[in-house]
Image: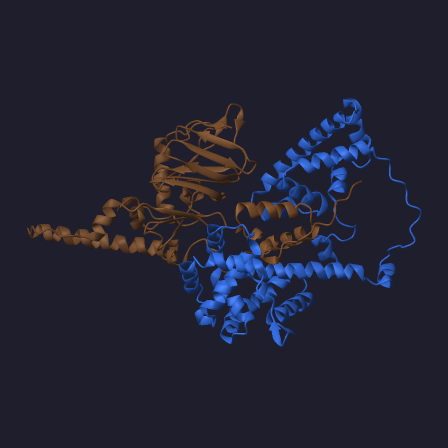
Chain colours: A blue, B brown
């Protein structure tokens, strides 16, 4: 049964025959064993996935024209079991898979294991209703195929790290000197709830990109260079932004504390005497997940080396 | 402490890859950022992929067709042109001496005459005095903050020498035809120009440390901007470049430039990574920060 959203998108595609034909030619899908109808169906599925039901024909056109259609055709032809497509895919990407795994894990046996597991998922070692299920059927051409492979491998690596942390051997932990019967924890210094509220208010008001930078820096421990690379800007831009953000946040928090009835002097002192200084306070307010679930690459690499 | 709920609906690998490669439209990039700002797991994935070397097949700094104009070929091309020039000049003199008056078309001589700088000035071997002045490598004029100034005669000589050192072959001098150049920026921030409607592209060296993210072209005028706080202008389609440092009052533009718009030769607008907007109404002679 066709999903309603695909039906409505299919309606929009009725006026886009020329576009679909052009993209089909550009994608070289025919050489890889995909028919025009199969290709059109793939485009409809992708449009239904990413566009709302209120999308216009122009929205559909814009989305489709932005897709990496040649790589999309290759991936979907592989998923459909076309041998010729697999030959092309292996020629282009098999070595890269192992290279990427090596860069991610920094250790050859883990890299091989990661690459092999991804390769198996791409090939499709599981079946559903007698048909092979390949991970490549979920590639949608929004980015390059290699970029998608890198992301899939990175996700698998992060998931493996988290699973490993949950099931780590207690004996290993004891031998490593970790103590489990911790002494009675020292009570944390009391934090004025007005400070927490003011910090929450200030953080909620900042732009997503700024929040992303703060979280990457304070929570994830990423370097300025790493954050700059992710956002495609110069490292000095991130450095300036962080300074500007910290100053602005301090100002906003002080203003919010004043609105909560705290005098200026008292507000400044509360930010100073809190043993968790402003940076630590930001870190605590940015945390959204349970402790221990965060993935830290430096830590993961260090653990891989031991 | 109020912990927020686990963020729902994690973006799939397609969107995360599209985000990392800057291939998503603006509104989707913003949505992704919103999710990434509250999701440690997805941030970790994006950080991992951003740290990897560029994918194979990413736009090369110099397209294959332009390799013929890389320095080793240019050197031998220029040497061959010199031989042709000398041989032709000798032949022409001999012809004159025999009093033949037929007009001889000598394309090689003509091209030498039209672009003497590119043939007469050879790149000095590394280690020589001339090679020790890399500042002349780019035809660039440092500008005192606030105003674009005309190059001094010494700077113009530097520009001529820099032209010989540029990545362009002699026959790329402009404008031989009426076709306007086309421009593009690679993912690594290098500038490329095509003079044949996009059939072949050549890297244009503007400044060694700059990574460009925005450009605006209008006829032979071109503006490029990027990081670190880099802004350059050429009025002859990239033959010569001038660095511009906008100032407004006490403020000097120090952020990376991510957007440039010029509606005509004089009126333009810059957008910085911090969201500031700088405008000019006199082709960059003076600027106002909005």
The structure residue drawn at horizontal position 55% and vertical position 57%, both measured from the top left corner, is A48
Quadrant assignment for the N terminus of chain B: top right
- Name the foreground residue: B90 vs A26: A26
Q: Judge whether A302 appears above or below B251 on screen.
A: below
The answer to whether any part of residue B244 appears in the image is yes
- Name the foreground residue: B63 vs A140: A140
Q: Is residue B5 left or right of residue B194?
A: right
- Name the foreground residue: A179 vs A50: A50
The structure residue drawn at horizontal position 81% and vertical position 62%, both measured from the top left corner, is A167
Return the x and y of residue A71 as percentages of the image width and height: 50, 63
Q: Is residue A236 left or right of residue A199?
A: left
Q: Judge whether B182 appears above or below B142 on screen.
A: below
The structure residue drawn at horizontal position 50% and vertical position 26%, both measured from the top left corner, is B248
- Name the foreground residue: A62 vs A48: A48
Numbered-mark total? 0
Q: Judge whether A19 appears above or below A119 on screen.
A: above
Q: Is residue A44 left or right of residue B40?
A: left
The answer to whether any part of residue A144 appears in the image is no
Return the x and y of residue B131 as percentages of the image width and height: 42, 45
Q: Is residue B234 left or right of residue B16?
A: left
Q: Judge whether B283 appears above or below B93 on screen.
A: above
The structure residue drawn at horizontal position 45% and vertical position 67%, both measured from the top left corner, is A36
Return the x and y of residue A140 as percentages of the image width and height: 55, 60
Return the x and y of residue B274 as percentages of the image width and height: 57, 36
């Amino acid at each position: 049964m066709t999903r309603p959203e695909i039906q409505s998108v299919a309606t929009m595609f009725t006026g886009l025959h020329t576009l679909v034909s052009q993209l089909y030619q550009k994608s070289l899908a025919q050489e890889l064993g995909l028919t025009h109808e199969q290709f059109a169906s793939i485009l409809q599925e992708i449009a239904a996935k990413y566009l709302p039901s209120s999308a216009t024909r122009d929205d559909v056109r814009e989305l489709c024209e932005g897709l990496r259609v040649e790589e999309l055709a290759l991936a979907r032809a592989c998923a459909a079991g076309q041998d010729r497509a697999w030959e092309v895919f292996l020629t282009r990407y098999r070595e890269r898979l192992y290279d990427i795994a090596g860069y991610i894990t920094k250790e050859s046996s883990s890299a091989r294991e990661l690459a092999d597991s991804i390769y198996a998922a791409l090939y499709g070692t599981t079946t559903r209703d007698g048909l092979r299920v390949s991970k490549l059927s979920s590639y949608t051409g929004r980015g390059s195929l290699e970029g998608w492979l890198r992301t899939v491998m990175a996700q698998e690596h992060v998931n493996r790290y988290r699973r490993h942390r949950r099931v780590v051997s207690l004996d290993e932990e004891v031998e490593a000197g970790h103590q489990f019967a911790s002494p009675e924890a020292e009570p944390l210094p009391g934090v004025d709830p007005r400070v927490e509220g003011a910090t929450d208010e200030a953080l909620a008001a900042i732009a997503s990109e700024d929040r992303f930078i703060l979280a990457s820096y304070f929570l994830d421990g990423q370097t300025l260079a790493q954050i700059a690379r992710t956002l495609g800007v110069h490292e000095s831009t991130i450095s300036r932004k962080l300074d500007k953000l910290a100053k602005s946040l301090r100002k906003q928090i002080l203003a919010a504390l004043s609105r909560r009835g705290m005098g200026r002097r008292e507000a400044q002192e509360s930010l100073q005497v809190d043993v968790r200084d402003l940076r630590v306070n930001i870190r605590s307010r940015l945390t959204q997940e349970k402790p221990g679930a965060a993935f830290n690459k430096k830590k993961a690499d260090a653990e891989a080396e031991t | 402490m109020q912990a927020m709920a686990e963020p729902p609906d994690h973006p799939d690998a397609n969107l995360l890859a599209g985000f990392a490669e800057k291939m998503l439209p603006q509104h989707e990039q913003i949505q992704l950022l919103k999710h990434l700002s509250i999701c440690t797991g997805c941030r970790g994935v994006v950080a991992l992929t951003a740290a990897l070397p560029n994918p194979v097949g990413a736009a090369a700094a110099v397209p294959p067709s332009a390799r013929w104009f890389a320095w080793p070929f240019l050197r031998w091309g220029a040497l061959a042109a010199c031989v042709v020039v000398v041989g032709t000049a000798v032949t022409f003199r001999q012809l004159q001496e025999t009093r033949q008056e037929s007009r001889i078309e000598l394309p090689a001589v003509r091209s030498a005459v039209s672009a003497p700088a590119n043939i007469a000035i050879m790149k000095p071997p590394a280690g020589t005095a001339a090679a020790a002045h890399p500042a002349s490598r780019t035809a660039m004029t440092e500008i005192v903050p606030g105003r674009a100034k005309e190059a001094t005669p010494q700077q113009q000589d530097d520009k001529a020498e820099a032209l010989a050192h540029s990545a362009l072959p002699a026959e790329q001098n402009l404008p031989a035809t009426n076709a306007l150049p086309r421009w593009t920026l690679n993912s690594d921030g290098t500038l490329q120009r095509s003079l044949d409607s996009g059939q072949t592209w050549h890297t244009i060296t503007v400044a060694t440390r700059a990574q460009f993210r925005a450009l605006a072209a209008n006829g032979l005028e071109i503006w490029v901007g990027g990081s670190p706080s880099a802004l350059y202008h050429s009025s002859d389609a990239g033959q010569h470049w001038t660095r511009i440092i906008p100032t407004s009052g006490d403020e000097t533009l120090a952020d990376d430039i991510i957007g440039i718009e010029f509606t005509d030769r004089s009126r333009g607008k810059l957008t910085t990574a911090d969201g500031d907007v700088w405008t000019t109404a006199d082709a960059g002679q003076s600027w106002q920060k909005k």
